[in-house]
Amino acid sequence: MGNLEKYSEKQAQLCIKYGEVDSELYNICGVKRGLRDINGQGVVAGLTNISKITAFKMENGEKIPCDGELLYRGYDIQDLIIGNLGRKNIYEEGAYLLLFGELPNEEQLVEFKKMIADNMTLPTNFTRDVIMKAPDTDIMSSMTKSILTLASYDTKKNDLSVENVLRQSIQLISTFPMLAVYGYHAYNHYKNDESMFIHRPSADLSIAENFLRMLRPDKKFTELEAKVLDVALLLHMEHGGGNNSTFTTRVVTSSGSDTYSAISAAMSSLKGKRHGGANLMVMQMMDDIKENVKDKCDDDEVRAYLTKIVNKEAFDRKGLIYGMGHAVYSLSDPREQVFKSFVEKLANEKGRNEDMYLYSSIERMAPEIIAKERKIYKGVSPNVDFYSGFVYDMMGIPRELFTPLFAVARITGWSAHRIEELVADNKIIRPAYVSLVEKKIMHR
């Protein structure tokens, strides 16, 4: 251990001593921890025209839990998906909607897809000199490094006009799949000693199709795989201005910083396990359940083990059934509801019906167990990430790419919120803190 490590270890206790705050002071001072009240309701921090989340309805002045609803620019996400089942490019159509405020007609969608295809390119030798150099086990960090480096190639980096920021946004939307997949291949080659292959994206394919094409050695994928990934990207594209990474985007944008810095900050937020790692925790929990439950089709055995998890006697002993419940939704997550039918189809194609049965069993049992053991009687239902990790696993997408794939989807939502923050010309976001510092007299 070096001198700095030893010093830090010793001095860390002072940081802890003077960093602790009595939790009761939050109540005394009327401060909402994490900008949320005791019921989890967030502090209103802004206005947006981009999306709307509904989890409750008002009846006779009383707040009543209801089935969740997520609207993109006023359109229900379930309608956006169900209305386009016979075609691909669901994500691209959603991206156009979020960025420009209205659904594209056929001509507008073709033009937008061409813009994305034309910008699926990186600067000369960028892959070799930036992505493949010093590859990172953490692909999110690799992508963030690449985003910040791309800024040095942009002569109009600091131009905050809507036209320029829109150009930058479309370029990032187009290249994010490349940054993610190439970052993984570099890591997999240099760290895991696996074969290296770098496939160029095809202008004829959707973002979902290109992601699968670039990831796989043979470039091949099924029509159902591409469809399910397309749907997954749309469902993860946007989720209101209050989620941590989107709020980060707006905070950095409000300071007058450039697009690359704002999106890099959002990436740093999303990589945190409390935000972008939900499906990874579900997968780890499912691994643990499969190891400890002999018969996955035995409901009594599954129920008994889930009860142990809730009572902090199994898995990570935190008492959580991951993928169950959501900070906003109460009775149901609309993303999970529309996604599940696609998950079932993919499980059937991949011969994973037994795993699908286990997931469905947990979805059915978990709310009852949580209500009984934890005395939580508000709606507890699965969220979209209960199934998303399972879907990615069935497609052979490595777990190192789960959160980067989230970023590939969410870059559109971040871009829309950045542009809205610039158009609104809001003041710099500067929340207030209650100071507990008292003046001291220096004695020497």
Image (spheres, rainbow, N blue to C red):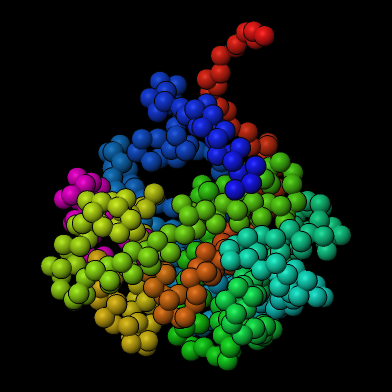
Question: In this picture, is 139 found above or below 344?
Answer: above
Residue shown at 81%/56% (left/top)? 157
Foreground of the two, 348 or 15 = 15
Foreground of the two, 386 or 43 = 386
Residue shown at 49%/77% (left/top)? 397
Residue 124: in sight, yes or no?
yes
Q: Quadrant of residue 325?
A: bottom left
Question: Residue 357, percent across and down?
Answer: 25, 76
Q: How many discs mark residues in the rendered view?
A: 0
Residue shown at 39%/49% (left/top)? 327
Is residue 141 a member of the stretch shown in magenta?
A: no
Question: Residue 302, percent across and down?
Answer: 19, 67
Q: Residue furthest left?
A: 300
Foreground of the two, 329 or 195 = 195
Question: Residue 348, percent across and down?
Answer: 33, 86
Question: In this picture, is 388 found above or below 161?
Answer: below
Foreground of the two, 350 or 112 = 350
Residue 377: in sight, yes or no?
no
Quadrant including the C terminus: top right
Q: Quadrant of residue 346?
A: bottom left
Is residue 379 a member of the stretch shown in magenta?
A: yes
Magenta stretch in the rendered image: 363-386
Q: Is residue 168 left or right of residue 195?
A: right
Residue shown at 63%/65% (left/top)? 136
Question: In this picture, is 341 found above or below 404?
Answer: below
Question: Residue 404, percent across and down?
Answer: 56, 66
Q: Is residue 170 left or right of residue 194?
A: right
